[in-house]
Every structure is written in structure tokens, then in C-alpha cells.
Image (cartoon, rainbow, N blue to C red):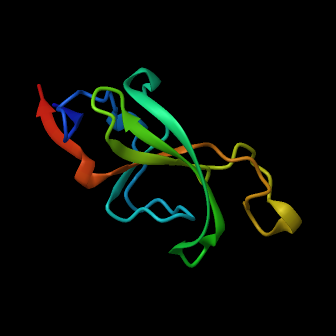
Amino acid sequence: MATVYCCRECGANLNLYSSHLFPPDFYFEAGNKNTLSFSAVDSSKFRFEKEDKIRPFFETVNYWGIQRKRTKIKCNSCGKIVGYVYDDGPPLTDGIGQFGFGPSQAIPRNPRYRFKNKSLAISSET
């Protein structure tokens, strides 16, 4: 049985595959509460809209600041926001990081596609 992820608003199949799903206990700087995170998505099913706000934000102890740059993920069928793209995925390099302290924002990182649980309808298909 395969899991099918659909937009809760319009019911469109979003082509999100469980093989691209990060484990629920995987650590991300921006957190992972009430969300599902994927390493890849079918970009034909979504519209991506850049967001650049200068306003204080606080997601976790390690992910906060004044300026928030992220990308909104909108359903291509209905236009509802289903999640965001963050740049806190696994590092693109296997290096020890800046000054040997591990990965940081200075090291290029893979994108993480973070979908809100409340915007996804999950069903099983045989």
C-alpha cells in the first residue's frame, strides 16, 4: 500500500512520495513540529513564491532572527499555502563545517520542503 498526499482544500494529488520523506525525528534548525518534510517534490504540482520579511521570528532556539527569507509552497490547483521551503536540509558537502563546529548556514544545504499537516489529506491506495 502506498500513501497518497492530497491538498485538503481541493483534493488534488500532490505527488509526494514516502521515499522522499525525512524521518520524524530528523533534526532541523527550523524545527519539524506538526509538519512533514520531504527532500524532493514534483514542481509541476506547486507554485513557489518568495517571501522576504523584516520582522522578528522565533521558530526554535537555533532558528530565529530579524529577517526571514523563505519560499511559500502553494497548491497549483487552488492556490492555498501548503508549506514552505527551508534551506536547513542535509549539507551539500561532507565537510566538518566552519571552524570545525559542524554544519552551519555558511555551508550550502539541500532544500527541505516542509508541509503543514493541517493542509494535507493523507490516504492509502493499493
Q: Is residue 40 visible?
A: no
Q: Residue 61's quadrant in the figure?
A: bottom right
Assign the C terminus to one quadrant of the image. top left
For residue 90, side relative to residue 6 (left or right) = right
Q: In this view, does 77 lie to the left or right of 63?
A: left
Q: Which residue is drawn at 52% across and 74% down?
A: 60
Residue at 34% in and 32% down: 17
Residue lying farthest to the front in this orientation: 54
Q: Which residue is drawn at 57% across and 50% down?
A: 70
Say left or right for 93 vs 46.
right
Q: Where is residue 125 in the image (x, y as percent from the top left)?
A: 13, 28
In the image, residue 56 lies at what x, y percent? 59, 73
Furthest residue toward top: 44
Can you say whether 107 is above or below 8 in the image? below
Res. 39 visible in picture: yes
User: Looking at the picture, how far across and down is residue 10, in whole percent?
Assistant: 18, 33
Relative image position of residue 92 (x, y in whole percent): 70, 43
Q: Which quarter of the rendered picture does the N terminus lie within?
A: top left
The residue that appears at 14% across and 38% down in the rendered structure is 123
Would you say 95 lies left or right of 120 here? Answer: right
Give residue 122's quadrant in the image: top left
Q: How many labels does the image show?
A: 0
Q: Work out which residue is located at the far right of the displayed protein and give it.
A: 99
